[in-house]
Amino acid sequence: MHDLQLERFYQTGETSNGLVMIPDGPIKTFTLRGIKDSPPYLHDGRLMTLADCVEFFNLVLGLNLTEQEKANLVAYMLAL
Ligand code: HEM
């Protein structure tokens, strides 16, 4: 279980894309096996593609990934 603490990036009760933003709390970390076959991603289906997932974690975790590193991660997940 991990809490990504996304409430760091918004005010609780704020509306985004028509949804009210509230803290998610701890979420079960999904297996990535066969991940290419099960979009949309994250527990609430907020991310449409694996490239979106890489960019999401790049921003949330402050990774500063290069374009090559992001492409490598997507290619890796497509192979699982
Ligand atoms: C570049 C690094 C990462 C990549 C490419 C990545 C990839 C993914 C993907 C594709 C999903 C969606 C799985 C699904 O919908 O079935 C996911 C979910 C998740 N990952 Fe990662 N991940 C990364 C780093 C991390 C780290 C470091 C953590 C923990 C500290 C983490 C914890 C989680 C959690 C808790 C979820 C579920 C989130 C939710 O449903 O809201 N991930 N990850």
Image: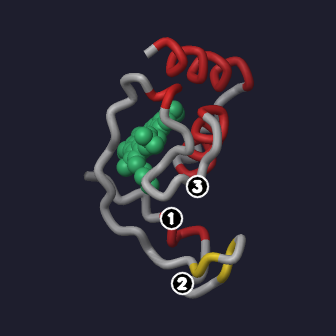
Mark linked to residue 35: none
Which residue position is annotated with label 2?
A: 12
**Mark 3 and mark 2: span between their CA atoms?**
18 Å
Q: Which is nearer the N-term, disc 3 or disc 1?
A: 1
Q: Splitting the image into 4 quarters, where does residue 70 fall? A: top right
Decide which of 57, 76 is in the foreground and name it.
76
Q: Residue furthest top?
A: 79
Q: Which is nearer the N-term, disc 3 or disc 2?
A: 2
> At 71% across and 71% down in the image, what residue appears?
17
Location of residue 10 in the rendering, given as x and y in whole percent from the top left corner: 61, 75
Above or below: residue 68 compared with residue 58: above
Q: Quick one: SS at disc 2?
A: loop
> At 52% across and 44% down in the image, what residue appears?
41
Location of residue 76 in the rendering, given as x and y in whole percent from the top left corner: 52, 15
Q: Is mark 3 within 8 Å of ligand 1?
A: yes
Give the image quadrant in which the ligand numbered 1 is located. Answer: top left
> At 48% across and 49% down in the image, what residue appears?
42
For the residue carrying disc 3, how many other residues have a C-alpha within 10 Å: few (<14), some (14-19), or many (20+)? few
Q: Nearer the viewer, mark 3 or mark 2?
A: 3
Quarter of the picture holding the C terminus: top left
Question: Is disc 2 in contact with disc 1, using a CB cutoff of under 8 Å?
Answer: no
Above or below: residue 27 compared with residue 19: above
For the residue carrying disc 1, how many other residues have a C-alpha within 10 Å: few (<14), some (14-19), or many (20+)? few
Above or below: residue 32 compared with residue 40: above
Q: Which is nearer the N-term, disc 2 or disc 1?
A: 1
Which residue position is annotated with label 3?
A: 46
Amino acid type of the residue that numbered disc 2 sits on in the rendered structure: Thr
Which residue position is annotated with label 1?
A: 6
> At 60% across and 23% down in the image, what residue appears?
74
